[in-house]
Image (tube, rainbow, N blue to C red):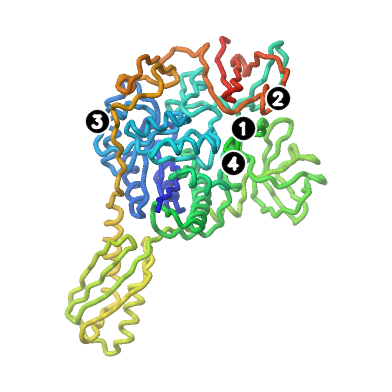
Amino acid sequence: MRSLELLAPAKDLATARAAIDSGADAVYMGGPSLGARAAATNSLDDIREAARYAHLFGARLYMTMNTIVYEHELEAAAKLAQQAIDAGVDALIVQDLAYTRMGLCNAELHASTQMYNATPERVAFLGKAGFSRIVLERGLTAEQMREICSATDKEIEVFIHGAICVCGSGRCYMSRSLSHRSGNRGECSQPCRQRYDLVDASGRCIRKGLHLLSVKDLDLSAHIDELIDMGAVSFKIEGRLKDTTYVRNITAHYSRLLNEAIARRGDCRRASRSRVQLDFTPSPAKTFTRLGGDYIFRGKRPSLASFDTPKALGEPLGKVSKVAGRRFMLDRRVTLTPGDGICLIAGGELVGTNVNAFDGSFITPNRMDGIAVGATVYRNFDKLFNDALTSTRTRRTLPLWLSVAGTTNSITLTAREESGTTLTATLEGPFDAASKPEVAISSLRTALAKSGGSVFDVEDVAIEFEGATPFIPMGAANSLRRTLLEDMERTLSERVPPKNIAREDSSAPYPMRHIGGDHNVVNSLARRFYEEHGVERIDEGYDLLPDLEGIEVMRTPYCIRREIGHCLKQGSKLQEPLHLVHGSERYRLRFDCRACEMYLTKERS
């Protein structure tokens, strides 16, 4: 039976708890520093508490240290990594290979997607180089994923939902080409979400002022079984900067899908235990989404980008069919609530407003900006759904079986949790014999069956006494139950799941003898790692260069030519070179049709 893990993001402790409560088998979150989301940092105390809460359900907590580490930071990075491990973190997700040379004790290392894990050769090597898990690049086809999974016996983690970086992860220097804000340092300024002009060799503007690099979000809801068949064991949701409502909704959605897949198959199980009780029906379209799809999972094709806006549109409601003064009607039946947020594209801009009233046919918005017959209207905020997410209680519980035995001198309460953990608590007497034994036993069973505000659901209470039935005061019975449940919760939360620590094969050769600046080697420990694995020439990492003019700052499977109907394979005559222009910034495009990839080079302004 393979264990399958749903891995959810968390920007803070509250979100981590919400992710676990919503069905996550593991959570990943940033620590105090060196995470690829500089705006999502957490103290070690919060990391420790998040790990404790996860361990209560047999779930795991991973800390992201997935940025490159400069030479002067090596000592502090090693100290922080060890502190995180000692605080209960189950694994470190890292980008910089320096972590393999820090002498960390009891460290399970996961190779971040920031390592650009996109080929069978690289993934196979990392599996031999001390990594127990490899997180695959997001921009891969199903065929590429399948080939990679068959190349290693190490755990494979795949992204199933969320934002897509148009560039290969860890190989984007576009932000760094504009300022000192580097994506490899968790400070990406997201230039791929900006507007650009596409200019041909003659200087003619082919596309003007569009978000030409802004791709739609990922949603692999329909491909869970296929990913399991490939050999993936961890299914990752993107979003360490997203709010708690997004995490609850998306985690609950994929938790249900994973449970359904497991029920159909019978050859796998969830990596953690417990039951999740939801008071809402998950719906990915109702929280942040850029009209998600499966990106290039099913192959490279057009319609991957959202040229009009990089923002979340939400769920499409229909087209405006009639405008009457300050009201309008759609071409299909919908149900709206005052307070809903709606938006549309008007004049190339995203325009949003709120619904003030809805009479079943006509919608009265707060503003009529951009609303005209034929415009497509989206709902980007569903008030009723959001109210359900924020006000209802999602509970994650553990089944518990209780049994009582004893005499009028003392009784013992035993609790058994489904993992087999068993604890006992004793209440000393003497107790009076019950005048009505059946009533006393019934009252005792009722009192002990209550789980209060704990994480437990009491499944059954078995009671068997020797001799006369003792009369147990309800206050004493409740106190005994609370003590035992608190002891059980503490015991389970302190139980650390076993780690999967991989050994490094020092004889494993790296697939390349020469590595360029895009391998992000910026410190002596990473350099030593590559040298010890046979690399003969190591170029300085691009983030160390004073400027990146003349450097290919982006490599992507997304192709603007294909997106606008000018694929070279289909005989397009669109004259090269092509450039993307944003203000004074200019990037030359290069197209590798054999690899079906596009490259951007920063040119002098």
- Label 2 vs label 3, nearer the camera: 2
> Disc 4 marks which amino acid?
Thr
Write down the residue under mark 4: 289
Labels 1 & 4 near each other (Cβ < 8 A): no
- The front one of 80 and 559 is 559
Secondary element under disc 1, as helix, strand or loop, is loop
Q: Could you give the CA–CA distance between mark 1 and mark 3, rounded to whole angstroms?
A: 42 Å
> Which of the two labelled residues, at mark 2 and mark 3, occupies the earlier sequence position?
3
Residue bearing the label numbered 2: 570
Of tags 2 and 4, the one toward the viewer is 2
Task: Residue 43 in the image: state x and y as whole percent.
Answer: 34, 39
Residue ID for mark 3 = 103
Q: Is residue 585 above or below residue 151?
A: above
Amino acid bearing label 2: Gln
In the picture of the structure, the residue carrying the numbered disc 1 is: 300
Q: Secondary structure at mark 2?
A: helix
Q: Mark 2 vs mark 1: give the one in front.
A: 2
| Cα separation between marks 2 and 3 | 53 Å
Seen at 70% across and 12% down, the residue is: 203
Measured in 3D between alpha carbons, the distance from the residue under mark 1 to the one under mark 4, in whole angstroms, is: 21 Å
Disc 4 versus disc 3: nearer the observer: 3
Q: How far apart, in angstroms, are the residues tagged by discs 4 and 3?
A: 41 Å
Question: Mark 1 or mark 3, which is nearer to you?
Answer: 1
- Quote the CA–CA distance across marks 2 and 1: 14 Å
Q: Amino acid at mark 3?
A: Gly
Query: Residue at 36% across / 62% down in the picture?
Result: 454
First in sequence: mark 2 vs mark 4: 4
- Circle 1 packing at 10 Å, graded few (<14), some (14-19), many (20+), is some
